[in-house]
Image (spheres, coloured by chain):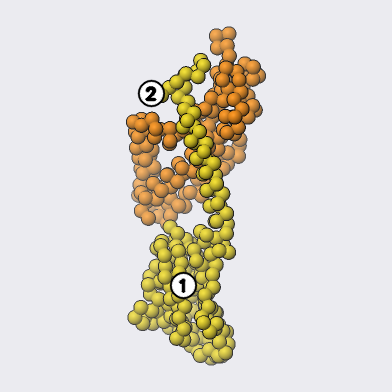
Chain colours: A orange, B yellow
Amino acid sequence: MSSVMRAVVVYLFLLALFRLAGKRSLSQVTTFDLVLTLIISEAVQQALISDDNSMTNAFLLVLTLVGLDILLSFIKQRSQRLSRLLDGTPVVVVEDGRLLRDRMKRERVDEGDILHAAREHQGLASLDEIAYAVVERSGGITVVPKHQDG
Amino acid sequence: MSDVTRVGRLEIDQNLRAQNNDWRAQRVGWGIMVSLVIAGALGVFGRGPLSHATARSPRGDVSLEYERFARLGAPLKLKVTLASGSLPSPVRLSISRQYLDRMMIERILPRPVRVRARGEMLDYAFELAGGRASRAEVVFEMQPSQAGVNHGTLGVGGQVLTFRQLVYP
């Protein structure tokens, strides 16, 4: 298989796999997420490079991968539907201070994760202080405090 | 973002219908992942119990151990066992060219004393210790060089075994 085809296949495989795995997979919550990311890159490396260690091959692969990324970003800009399909959508898990348990369960998020995000980004101490929490496309959680002007 | 909506005070491009589809697709995706991993462990993608196969000649004196599933560029073995009452020395094995063209042979054990092309086949001649033996094993170590379905033919003393291998890219 040519380098370009290899890069395209690997890119699409990983894209599909990580979309199916869900937002929260490998979203750098724990130390092990980072380790896992490194192991995955190591495993995929051989499939990308195969037996060709030339600079030409490396450049061709990087060009293909970055090119695909640019191409997809254009497509996503033009079509809302494809954008949702490729990137997913954010999900509100705390609305007006109410925990939406069903969505939390489906996104595999618990109170601990929401509190973690609240402490980290807003310096909030308890769930009462949270107005909104959203599981973003990236898998990270963002928090809006109740009294923004207070 | 044209589909930004309001959820209370929050302006957000949440789309619960798309999200529900996502969740459903994820369930299906996990099912597929689990089945692929199980299939992989069993050898459907090579190297496992479902991949290992043995073909035997009708008389039972020639057997060939091979892999049903192989991977491009990964080591692969063919093991031929001859077990007839008395084998002549040198004993002759022939393998179809069509098969070998799609392989890179790395090593043959024992080393053949002679290799000859004969039409669509390659004839390998192996010497046996003491001039005769009742049992001999020949191992071909190789690497598939092309993905796809490989049809192989092995001929020993007028008996022909055919086998098939699927080589994954």
Q: Local crowd at mark 2 within 10 Å, few (<14), some, or many (≥20)?
A: few
- Which quadrant is home to the C terminus of chain B? bottom left
Q: Is residue A129 left or right of residue B4?
A: right
| Whole-percent x, y for residue B80 in the image | 52, 77
Q: SS of the residue at dot 2?
A: loop
Q: CA distance from mark 2 to mark 1?
A: 59 Å
What residue is shown with label 2? B2
- Residue at 55% x, 56% y is B39
Query: In terms of depth relative to the viewer, which is nearer, A55 or A97?
Result: A97
- Residue at 59% x, 25% y is A100
- Residue at 47% x, 27% y is B15
Query: In terms of depth relative to the viewer, which is nearer, A146 or B60?
Result: B60
Q: Identify which amino acid the numbered label 2 is placed on.
A: Ser
Question: Which of the marked residues, 2 or 1, is nearer the chain's N terminus?
Answer: 2
Q: Residue furthest top?
A: A150
- What mark, if any, has residue B163 been given in the picture? 1
Taking the image as drawn, is residue A40 in sight? yes
- Residue A5 versus residue A119 in the image, above or below: below
- Which quadrant is home to the N terminus of chain B? top left
Subunit ID for the residue under disc 2 = B
Taking the image as drawn, is residue A116 in sight? no
- Residue B154 versus residue A134 in the image, above or below: below
Q: Is residue A65 left or right of residue B41?
A: left
Query: In terms of depth relative to the viewer, which is nearer, A91 or B109?
Result: A91
- Residue at 45% x, 46% y is A13
Q: Identify which amino acid the numbered label 1 is placed on.
A: Phe
- Residue A144 versus residue B91 in the image, above or below: above
- Residue B103 versus residue A79 in the image, above or below: below
| Whole-percent x, y for residue B45 in the image | 51, 59
